[in-house]
Image (cartoon, rainbow, N blue to C red):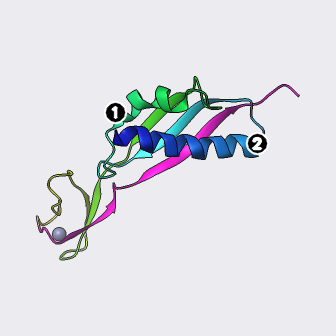
Amino acid sequence: MHELSVCQALIAQVEQIAAQHAAQGVKSVHLRLGPLSGVEPQLLQDAYPMACAGSVAAGSVLLIDLAPLKVKCQTCGAETQASPNRLLCGQCGDYHTQVVSGDEMLLMSVELIQGAA
Ligand SMILES: [Zn+2]
């Protein structure tokens, strides 16, 4: 299952951040996901509890922010929003477009639980 390995990679990143801050746990993980990232948000949500079981992120909440898909037109230069299966310029309808954003999977923030030291 693809989403589980994506989740595990994400948790590894979160664990590193938690270790850097000597955190006792993780409250939430905020992720930004583009429609072309190849990751299904719902499947990621489903895989998340499994992936973080036994890690410092166990019991945390995964928040997914869906990034818009944007293309830049090579004919008229406009930057417009497009749909994943139709990468056309919203301005002139040309298909000579370049994806500007929408294929990203970014870890935006991690809310850590700090011990009362
Ligand atoms: Zn155009």
The residue sitting at the left extreme is 93
Left/right placement of residue 79 relative to residue 54 reads left
45 and 3: which is toward the camera: 3
Left/right placement of residue 65 relative to residue 23 reads left
Magenta-drawn stretch contains 106: yes
Q: Which residues are magenta?
A: 94-117
Magenta-drawn stretch contains 28: no
- Position above or below: 101 against 105: below
Tell me which amino acid carries mark 2.
His
Q: Residue at x 15, y 52 (%)?
A: 85
- Position above or below: 113 against 40: above
Q: Position of residue 2 (x, y in %)?
A: 35, 43
Mark pair 2, 1: CA separation: 29 Å
Choose top left, top right, bottom left or bottom right for residue 12: top right
Mark number, residue 21: 2
Left/right placement of residue 24 relative to residue 110 reads right
